[in-house]
Image (tube, rainbow, N blue to C red):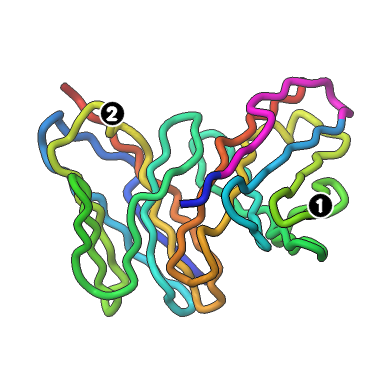
Amino acid sequence: GAVVSQHPSWVICKSGTSVKIECRSLDFQATTMFWYRQFPKQSLMLMATSNEGSKATYEQGVEKDKFLINHASLTLSTLTVTSAHPEDSSFYICSVLGGPSGNQPQHFGDGTRLSIL
Amino acid sequence: GQNIDQPTEMTATEGAIVQINCTYQTSGFNGLFWYQQHAGEAPTFLSYNVLDGLEEKGRFSSFLSRSKGYSYLLLKELQMKDSASYLCAVKDSNYQLIWGAGTKLIIKP
């Protein structure tokens, strides 16, 4: 299956800072990547679908100006949390489809734990 | 609306068998996935069902009944390392993945 690398693993920063998270597909080219957020003891929540070479598709309630997604190449998508505040503290996870067909699972990066002080 | 239901938490004994149920109501169906998620880690893929029946993979098996909107994950010969959350997810008619809230499985010695 696909191998996904996500960096950084942990970020602790002051309120108002912008934080960039990288997601790389290591063993195949991914036209589509997904960004999720997960609060403690809650389910995964899809934030947006990142499309290579075009604008991301954001889920209802997710501020696209706050969570900037750039999918500039077939192996890299980035999520930038702009002017982060304590309520943005969460576990952010990216994923890549294992292949083009509908039965392919999503393979996840290791996640980024973001703590805003 | 779309909905996936799983028990919030289950407890089982090391060496035993446990069945985690998942029921779903979605707009269309294009497959059901089970993932395992250890605390503080990202989910890892366990199984995929798109046709009715049982899929066996080692100690883990997954069953699907599309007519009933029902699936279960069966874990045999439980080990302490199986303590984790188990997530059920369904692909709807738009191939969008709808996630359940997960079942936290606690294994006791």
Q: Range of the magenta residues?
A: A4-17
Q: Quadrant of residue A58?
A: bottom right
Q: Which residue is mark 2?
A: B81
Picture layout, residue A40 above or below residue A78: above
Q: Residue at x 55, y 35 (%)?
A: A110
Q: Quadrant of residue A32?
A: bottom right
Q: Is residue B18 left or right of residue A19?
A: left
Q: Is residue A55 left or right of residue A99?
A: right
* Pointer 1 local density, CA inside 10 Å: few below 14, some 14–19, many at least 20: some
Does B64 appear in magenta?
A: no
| Percent x, y of residue B17 | 13, 42
| Percent x, y of residue B39 | 44, 30
Q: Which residue is mark 1?
A: A70
Q: Residue extending furthest front?
A: A27
Q: Give the Cα distance between marks 2 and 1.
A: 37 Å
Q: Residue at x 43, y 68 (%)?
A: A103
Per the image, label 1 sits on a secondary structure element best described as: strand
| Percent x, y of residue A40 | 54, 33
Q: Residue at x 81, y 33 (%)?
A: A19
Per the image, label 2 sits on a secondary structure element best described as: helix
Residue B10 is labelled as none
Dot 1 falls on which chain?
A
* Pointer 2 local density, CA inside 10 Å: few below 14, some 14–19, many at least 20: few
Q: Mark 1 is on which residue type?
A: Asn
Picture layout, residue A24 above or below residue A34: above
Picture layout, residue A14 above or below residue A40: above
Dot 2 falls on which chain?
B
Q: Which of B25 and A67 lies nearest the eye of the viewer?
A: A67
